[in-house]
Amino acid sequence: MKELILVIVGAALVNNIILSQFQGLCPFLGVSKKVDTSLGMGGAVIFVIVLASIVTNLIYTFVLVPFNVTYLQTIAFILVIAALVQFVEMFLKKNVPSLYQALGVFLPLITTNCAVLGSALTNVQKEYNFIFSVANGFGTAVGFTVAIVLLASIRESIEDNDIPYNFQGSPIVLITSGLMAIAFMGFSGLIK
Amino acid sequence: MNKCMERIYNGIVKENPTFVLMLGMCPTLAVTTTAVNGVGMGLSTTAVLVFSNLIISALRKIIPDRVRIPAYIVIVASLVTIVQLLLQAYVPSLYSSLGIFIPLIVVNCIILGRAEAYAAKNGPLESAFDGIGMGLGFTVGLTSIAIVREIIGAGAVFGMTFIPEDFRITIFGLAPGAFFVLAGLTALQNKFKAPSATNGSAAPSKLACGGNCMTCSGSACSANHAVLEEIRAKAEAEAAAAKKAAAEKAAAAKKAAAEKAAQADKQE
């Protein structure tokens, strides 16, 4: 149990997927203008990454390893993730319309988000078993949500600030993320 | 041959994926800790890009439009796996320092973006040269960012020392430094009004996603295709309607003129 918590905290804070691993930067910079939308995006990412961790782990253990074709993992994972996102979208649209309204618009954006493929590959690389894969996926996604919601809140509050002309737009967002990355480096002493 | 050279110039200078289009931000920030990594990542991406453009362009008339994105992904993923295995076998040090970012080339928006914007519409030779140009442009971008980071952060680049140990700013070699260097770069582009996707002054890109990685979530290439088609159809319909309206107007004017003339005749 203690190890599981360590994996989750490690993935969420210490090795934050965005601020220290640099995966999933595009939605981080693109969908972080408002807190509401960033929360939606974060929710969708949690949903998809956890599902993808489950499915890719099953595919890896029960298909790729027995047939000795682990070198196909990149192809298999990206296809499985793309299909999974499509399927989830269709399923939610039909059966859980309330959830679909909250997350729906973000789902297609996530298909080729590198955070999803990245966490699936990390699970394999670190040889996590099923439970640990899910925990790691969950932690990773929570880390993504924390980072994107924080950035969105900062962006909302600096919106009316008098930013020097040259730094308006993306430069100030990048500097904000850099400062957040420094803050998140402080978590590195948390584990070990 | 001229067209091929033009593609290379276009990729390195006019539509440089890193500086102008701001594509593929994840590897740009992640692997630029050392110049060697930047060159390695750039060249790996170039290799994938050239062959994916070549194959996709050769198969462009065979792949049905509806399943083209999955088909592209399979082609790209196979190529990435080949590159990954080659790197693992022949350059193990580079393989371990690039780590997970080699398989993540699959989801790099440059590759699907070029497939969608260029290779799907042009011949294999030009597409291959487009891949070379874009790949080299990406390599140049990564390497120059990496050189800046390595000189400021570690004081040395390609084994040559420039800054004594006391004056190095180590943070530039770490994760936050990547953000700061890119922020500085985009601020300079704003300052000099250089064409860049970030300040909206870039020439409208032919990329389906508009080439703006800041608002891209990776799947823009596929999502935008439908939108673009819609806009195109709308524009065409509008043009047709305008033409029709103009023709009607002209006809009406002619009729009115004829009536007037007839009336004038009558009065006389």
Image: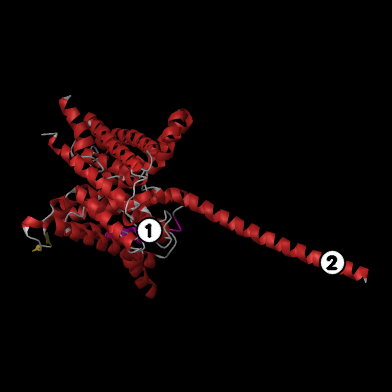
- Cα distance in 3D space between marks 1 and 2: 59 Å
Q: Amino acid at mark 1?
A: Arg
Total marks placed: 2
Q: Position of residue A3 (x, y in %)?
A: 16, 28
Task: Name the residue at 23% across, 52% down.
Answer: B180
Which residue bears the numbered disc 2?
B260
User: Quick one: label 2, few (<14), some, or many (20+) residues within 10 Å?
Assistant: few
Numbered label attached to residue A8: none
Which image quarter is the C terminus of chain A in?
top left
A138, above or below B162, in the image: above
Magenta part of the chain: B46-62
In the rendered structure, does residue A123 fall within the stretch colored magenta? no
User: Quick one: label 1, few (<14), some, or many (20+) residues within 10 Å?
Assistant: many
A132, above or below B183, in the image: above
SS category of the residue bearing label 2: helix
SS category of the residue bearing label 1: helix
Give the mark nearest the N terminus, 1 or 2.
1
Q: Position of residue B30 (x, y in %)?
A: 22, 50
Prevailing secondary structure of the magenta residues:
helix
Which chain is disc 1 placed on? Answer: B
Which residue bears the numbered disc 1?
B114
Q: Name the image quarter holding residue B116.
A: bottom left
Task: Name the residue at 17% across, 49% down.
Answer: B174
A53, above or below B115, in the image: above
**Front tag of 1 and 2:** 2
Q: Name the image quarter holding residue A133.
A: top left
Nearest the viewer among B66 and A175 is A175
Which chain is disc 2 placed on? Answer: B
